[in-house]
Image (cartoon, rainbow, N blue to C red):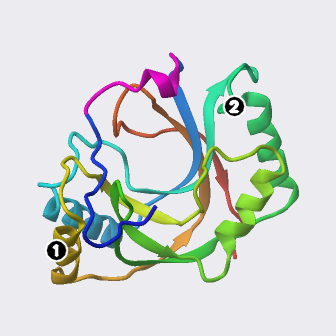
């Protein structure tokens, strides 16, 4: 999961992945939109700084993935990663029943998965974990790895050595930002478009803290 020293990164190949999407189009998730101007500016700066090693084009908005749902369908069908409108409605109803208030998160430092460069997110109050547990009551998550809240800067495009990545991380000035989360967003992206934009489908407003 996390990138280790002295090993190659896992690059993203510019190709379709039919064995994954099986002809389905809309992949869905709950996420947090990043709206603080100072943080957005900082993230853009970092993405530009590492642009020579990150996959392009990348039109996906900066966000924090909260819960990976799967391929959005009218009805649960044949695949384990299908996610029905009925399951979405169950999640929304559960959020409505268990009132959740706005909360704060803090951005951390640069880090890397084997396939992607990212900014760590500090959820010291456990707010994200609490919401995720509510979602689990309605469906399993399509995510075999341990949850690690983060903001992805980009996927690697070339088979470079991790030591070069870590050296660049160590040599760039880094900042941290605290920001308020006031809504949860359910949205989709096109499975056949690598790093394509997120399209909001439903937004759940949190109460005033």
Circle 1 residue: 168
Q: Could you tell me which secondary element the residue under label 2 belongs to?
A: loop
Q: Position of residue 137 (x, y in %)?
A: 84, 51
Foreground residue, 179 or 7?
7
- Secondary structure, magenta segment, majority class: loop
The picture quadrant where one finds residue 52 is: bottom left
- Image point (67%, 51%), residue name: 204
- Image point (66%, 81%), residue name: 125
Circle 2 residue: 80
Mark 1 nearby-residue class (10 Å; few <14, some 14–19, many ≥20): few
Foreground residue, 82 or 84?
82
- Image point (16%, 60%), residue name: 48
Left or right placement of residue 57 versus residue 128 in this view: left
Left or right placement of residue 198 versus residue 51 in this view: right
Q: Residue furthest front?
A: 6
Q: Residue furthest top?
A: 23
Q: Position of residue 101 (x, y in %)?
A: 72, 69
Magenta stretch, residue numbers: 14-23
């Amino acid at each position: 999961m996390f990138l280790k020293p002295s090993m190659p990164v896992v690059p993203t190949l510019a190709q379709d992945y039919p064995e994954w999407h099986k002809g389905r189009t809309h992949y869905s998730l709950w996420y947090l939109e990043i709206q603080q101007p100072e943080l957005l500016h900082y993230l853009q700066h970092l993405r530009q700084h590492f642009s020579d090693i990150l996959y392009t084009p990348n039109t996906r908005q900066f966000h924090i993935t909260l819960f990976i749902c799967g391929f959005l369908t009218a009805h649960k069908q044949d695949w384990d990663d299908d996610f029905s409108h009925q399951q979405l409605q169950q999640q929304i109803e559960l959020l409505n029943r268990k009132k959740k208030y706005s909360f704060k998160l803090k951005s951390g430092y640069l880090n890397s998965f084997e396939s992607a460069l990212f900014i760590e997110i500090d959820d010291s109050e456990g707010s994200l974990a609490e919401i995720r547990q509510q979602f689990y009551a309605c469906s399993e998550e399509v995510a075999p790895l341990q949850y690690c809240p983060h903001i992805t800067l980009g996927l690697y495009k070339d088979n470079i050595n991790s030591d070069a990545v870590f050296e660049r991380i160590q040599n760039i000035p880094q900042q941290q930002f605290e920001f308020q989360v006031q809504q949860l967003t359910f949205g989709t992206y096109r499975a056949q478009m690598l790093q394509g934009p997120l399209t909001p489908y439903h937004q759940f407003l949190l109460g005033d803290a």
